[in-house]
C-alpha cells in the first residue's frame, strides 16, 4: 500500500511522462485522480500493451492509461486538472439544450448515446454505469471507465471522434466517464 501511494505521488508529480503500461509507441492518454470514492472499468479487457487501470479505495486513487486509435490527425492533448467544484461550476453554465460535455466528447452521436444509456443506469455506482454503457453502446474494442472523486483529477482530453470524456451528474454525484477506441496494433 505504501509503495502504491508513493507510486501515485510520483505519477502526480511526473504526470506528463506517466505511463504504467508497458508500451511506449503510439498515442496515449492518461488520468490520475485523488479522493476517489468509486471506480470501474470495462469494455475491452485490461492489457498492459494498450489498456491499464488501477484503482484503490483505501488510498483514494485511480490511474488509467490507454493507447488510442485516433480517427483524425489532430492529436493535440488538452491537459486538465479539475476538482468536482470545477465540474459542477462548468455544468451550471449550461441549460438543458446545450451539452457541457461537447468540448471533451466531440462526436454528437456518441454523446447522445452515452446520455441515453445513462438514463438506464439503475444504481448509484460506477460498476452499474460502466455495465450499462457496455451493454447499450455496443462498441467492441473500446475502453470504458468511470471514476467518482471528491478531490481532483488530472487528465488528458483530445478532440477526436474516437475519444470521449463525459461528466455525468447522476444521483447527486458527478461521475467522470471516459471512452476510447483502443489501438491494439
Ligand atoms: C491540481 O489541483 C489541485 C487543487 O484542486 C492541487 O492541489 C494540485 O496540486 C493540482 N495539481 C497539479 C499537478 O496541478
Ligand atoms: C487541434 O485541436 C486543438 C484542441 O482541441 C484545437 O485547439 C486546434 O485548433 C486544433 N487544430 C487544428 C489544426 O484543427
Image: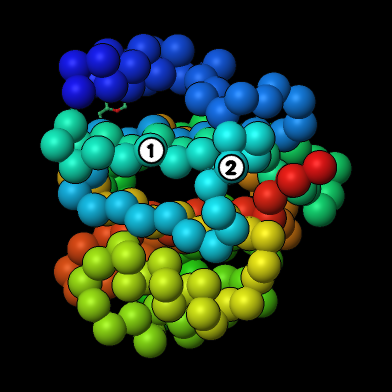
x 48%, y 84%: residue: 116
| Relative horizontal placement of residue 172, taking residue 54 as reference (left or right) | left
Q: Which residue is mark 2?
A: 47
| Relative horizontal placement of residue 129, taking residue 38 as reference (left or right) | right
x 25%, y 38%: residue: 56
Q: Confirm whether residue 97 shows in the render.
A: no
Q: Are marks 1 and 2 in contact (CB under 8 Å)?
A: no
User: Could you tell me which secondary element the residue under label 1 belongs to?
Assistant: strand
Between disc 1 and disc 2, whose residue precedes?
2
Q: Which residue is mark 1?
A: 54
Q: CA distance from mark 1 to mark 2?
A: 12 Å
Q: Position of residue 60 (x, y in %)?
A: 20, 37
What label does residue 85 carry, if any? Answer: none
Q: Position of residue 133 (x, y in %)?
A: 48, 74
| Relative horizontal placement of residue 105, taking residue 3 as reference (left or right) | right
Disc 2 crowd rating (10 Å Cα; few below 14, some 14-19, many 20+) is few
The quarter in which the N terminus is drawn is top left
Q: Position of residue 115 (x, y in %)?
A: 47, 78
The quarter in which the C terminus is drawn is top right
x 68%, y 50%: residue: 182
Amino acid at each position: 500500500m505504501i509503495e502504491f501511494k508513493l507510486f501515485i505521488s510520483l505519477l502526480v508529480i511526473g504526470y506528463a511522462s506517466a505511463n504504467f503500461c508497458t508500451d511506449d509507441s503510439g498515442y496515449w492518454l492518461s488520468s490520475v485522480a485523488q479522493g476517489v470514492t468509486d471506480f470501474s472499468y470495462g469494455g475491452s479487457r485490461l492489457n498492459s500493451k494498450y489498456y491499464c487501470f488501477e484503482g484503490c479505495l483505501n488510498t483514494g486513487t485511480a490511474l488509467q492509461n490507454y493507447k488510442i486509435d485516433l480517427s483524425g490527425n489532430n492529436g493535440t492533448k488538452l491537459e486538465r486538472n479539475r476538482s468536482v467544484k470545477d465540474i459542477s461550476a462548468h455544468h451550471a453554465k449550461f441549460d438543458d439544450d446545450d451539452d457541457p460535455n461537447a468540448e471533451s466528447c466531440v462526436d454528437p452521436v456518441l454523446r447522445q448515446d452515452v446520455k441515453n444509456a445513462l438514463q438506464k443506469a439503475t444504481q448509484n455506482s460506477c460498476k452499474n454505469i460502466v455495465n450499462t454503457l457496455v451493454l447499450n453502446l455496443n462498441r467492441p474494442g473500446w475502453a470504458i471507465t468511470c471514476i467518482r472523486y471528491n478531490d481532483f483529477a488530472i487528465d488528458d482530453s483530445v478532440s477526436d471522434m474516437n475519444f470521449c470524456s463525459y461528466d455525468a451528474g447522476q444521483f447527486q454525484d458527478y461521475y467522470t466517464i471516459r471512452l476510447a477506441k483502443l489501438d491494439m496494433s
